[in-house]
Amino acid sequence: MAFIITRVGIAGVAYFATPIMADSTVPPYHLRPDNILIDVFASRWDTGFYTSIADQGYRIQGVEFPSVAFFPLMPVLIRLLRLLTGDTLLAGLLVSNAALIGAVMLFHLLVASEHDQSTSDRAVWYLLIFPASFFGSAIYSESLFLLTGIAALYLARKSRWWAAGVVSILAAMTRFVGILLAPLLIVEWWQRHRRQLREDPDTYDENNQVIRCKPPEWADLIAASLAPIGTLAYMIYLTQKFGDPLAFLHASNTWGRTPANLLETLSELVTRPSQGWLSAFSAGALPLDNWLDLSFVIFFVVLGIILTVQNRWSEGIFVTLGALVPFSSGLLMSQRRYMWMLFPAFILLARWGRNPIVDRIIFIISLLMLGLFTAMFANWYWVG
């Protein structure tokens, strides 16, 4: 129900915002001008990269922005589904939304395995009303990453380590940050091993001294470490196709993404404008968009640290690294979208949401920003 309500709401905002708002000055492209909703969610910004890869394959030469920066699983699935639909855009939308439905269902099961029904429901709602959640219904890879990431952790907690490892490989073939599922699953394995030792009555004597230590399941640890295979597979393909295993990193440089010192990135944001703070504020010349992205990063880093302090180490490490790794690229652009994929953070928020005041604050802020960002995205304004 949450999926239907939020998707209908997002579609409604996009539909009415398109004729009401003025278009951005960015030269737009319209792949389906005769259908507003398909055009909005299949013909904006990065959607064109995924559809062109599905139709024509990867390109490096003769293009301003090489498409190899986009990992292959999403366009591969679009191409496969296009065999049934005969329409690349429709196939892309089906892949994204089917993945989001699957992610939501698994996320509810994941949260319900440790928490009550109301907390599970809240976690799903918070995930679906996050300000950047409309990307989950567009031809972007976020929903597919959520599906594979959530599935990997869910399977690991069911002790199905090899299945979790295989799914983590798929996540790493979806986005570069999929490689972070390796530390997530490795720490999850370590926590589970320690928990089994504590729960085994034969581990300790009457003085609480260790008398027998059950050896760890090393095969499970190997399975938990498989995620980098997905990245390696893409690198092998790039080597064979273009002679450059790091082509995806080199392509990212064209967007201005190069490894940068975090403190330098922060200092640039707080450097006094040449005309002074007051004059810059009056003229609307403050980098508010970058500050907004930075606020999302800081918020999720704090959530990751809190999860770690609460001894939820696997979740905390994943959220913290998932926030810092994209931020270390030296480019704040799109950070709010990247934060949406850090799903364990929404479990923490759902626990806090047991307080009605906190719940209302999260709902109000999320819905207002979701509506604004959806309307802007529909009219070619950059929001992530």
Image (cartoon, rainbow, N blue to C red):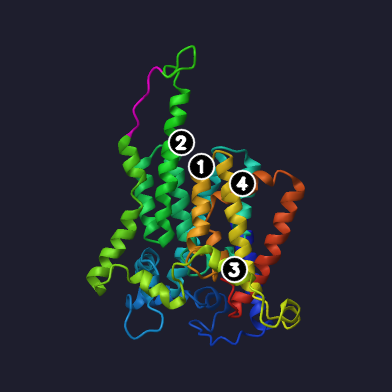
Q: Are marks 4 and 3 in contact (CB under 8 Å)?
A: no
Boundaries of the magenta span: 211-217
- Kind of residue indicated by mark 4: Leu
- Category of crowding for the residue at label 3, using alpha-carbon neighbours closer than 10 angstroms: few (below 14), some (14–19), many (at least 20): few
Q: Separation of disc 1 and disc 2 at Cα?
A: 8 Å
Q: Is residue 143 visible?
A: yes
Which residue is more in the foreground, 223 or 204? Answer: 204
Query: How far is mark 3 from mark 1, CA to CA?
Result: 30 Å
Which mark, residue 313?
1
Mark 1 touches mark 2? (CB < 8 Å): yes
The reply to whether dot 2 and dot 4 touch (C-beta < 8 Å) is: no
**Which of labels 4 and 3 is toward the front?**
3
User: Closer to the observer: label 2 or label 3?
Assistant: 3
Instruction: Give whichever of discs 4 and 3 has the lower sequence position.
Output: 3
Residue 24: where, in percent of width, then height?
A: 61, 84
CA gap between label 4 and label 1 equals 13 Å
- Res 323 label: none
**Residue 273 forms part of the magenta stretch:** no
The residue under label 3 is 267
Residue at mark 2 to residue at mark 4: CA–CA distance: 18 Å
- What separation in Å lies between label 2 and label 3 (alpha carbons)? 37 Å
Please tell me whether mark 2 sits on a helix, a strand or a loop. Answer: helix
Q: Nearer the viewer, mark 3 or mark 1?
A: 3
| 375 lies left or right of 185 | right
Whether the residues at callouts 2 and 3 have beta carbons within 8 Å, the answer is no
Query: In the image, what residue type sits under mark 2?
Result: Gln
Mark 4 residue element: helix
Secondary structure mostly seen in the magenta stretch:
loop
**x, y percent for residue 88:** 41, 74
Q: Which residue is mark 4?
A: 348
Mark 2, other Cα within 10 Å: few <14 / some 14–19 / many ≥20 = some
Foreground: disc 4 or disc 1: 1
